[in-house]
Image: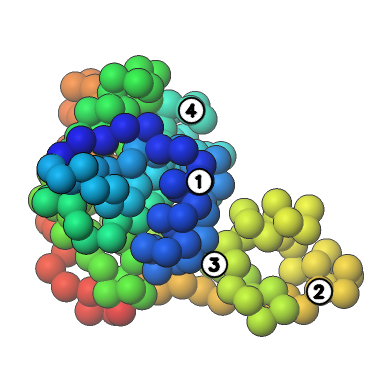
Amino acid sequence: MRLEKASYKAIKYACLKFHYAKSIPAAAFGYSVFNKNNEWCGVICYGLGATNNLGKSFDLVQGKCLELTRMALNGKQESTSKALAISIKLIVKNKPLVKLLISYADSEQKHIGIIYQATNWIFTETSNDTNLIINGKRMHRRSVGAKYGTSSIGKLKAKGINAEVIYTKDKYKYIYPLTKELKDKCLKLKKPYPKNASKA
């Protein structure tokens, strides 16, 4: 198995074809995954996340913390956990300023983060978020803001856009520190791994 920097074309195809969200995350970059037969298996994507404050609680400015935003794979890879582990090694090599990785497992999709548990990420908490329904289509607030210039319900309605707020189901938050100093801090937040998506 090998990974190499993914083109935007590869990211777009994999995210739209292989991932349940059927969307391309903002500011995405990533790695194409190839199996031992040199077959392309999809991409693993990272980005700055849905908020500019992604690493604020760890005293990290934007750019020093990345979110694992997509694992858009077609199932032909030998090991998903190995592919993820290799991608982390490439982050360390190619993005030396990055100190922390964050990802979320979505209970709405009956995910609890088995892949993160298998690769020794630290589980810290469950959380929920809000999405918007825009003219009947569910969208993340950041995507709405990028498209319409605002994610405020009042301002959207003033523009004649049919908008409403919905609350997501629980998401399981996992973190992966890339420095020893940060690892010691992160381990203080460690909680037992969730065993089932009971609220899915």
Q: Nearer the viewer, residue 10 or 163?
A: 10
Query: Which circle's residue, 4 or 3, is located before the other in the chain?
Result: 4
Mark 2–mark 3 Cα distance, whole angstroms, equals 18 Å
Query: Which circle's residue, 2 or 4, is located before the other in the chain?
Result: 4
Which residue shows up at 74% across the image and 62% down it?
152
Query: Which circle's residue, 4 or 1, is located before the other in the chain?
Result: 1
Residues under numbered marks 2 and 1 in contact, where contact means CB atoms less than 8 Å apart: no
Q: How crowded is mark 4: few (under 14 residues within 10 Å), some or many (20 or more)?
A: some
What's under tag 1, amino acid-wise?
A: Lys
User: Residue 62, position in %: x, y?
Assistant: 51, 30
What's under tag 2, amino acid-wise?
A: Ile
Mark seen at residue 130: 3
Residue 199 drawn above or below residue 188: below
SS for callout 1: helix
Mark 2–mark 1 Cα distance, whole angstroms, equals 31 Å
Q: Which dot, 2 or 3, sits closer to the camera?
A: 2
Q: In this view, does 79 lie to the left or right of 5?
A: left
Mark seen at residue 9: 1
What's under tag 4, amino acid-wise?
A: Gly
Residue with the most extreme bottom position: 136
Which residue shows up at 68% across the image and 60% down it?
144
Which residue shows up at 27% across the image and 74% down it?
110
Q: Which dot, 2 or 1, sits closer to the camera?
A: 1
Which residue shows up at 12% across the image and 50% down it?
79
Query: Which circle's residue, 2 or 3, is located before the other in the chain?
Result: 3
Q: Is residue 151 left or right of residue 9?
A: right
User: Residue 70, position in %: x, y?
Assistant: 38, 52
Q: Is residue 122 visible?
A: no
Locate the N terminus and report the quarter of the image it occupies. top left
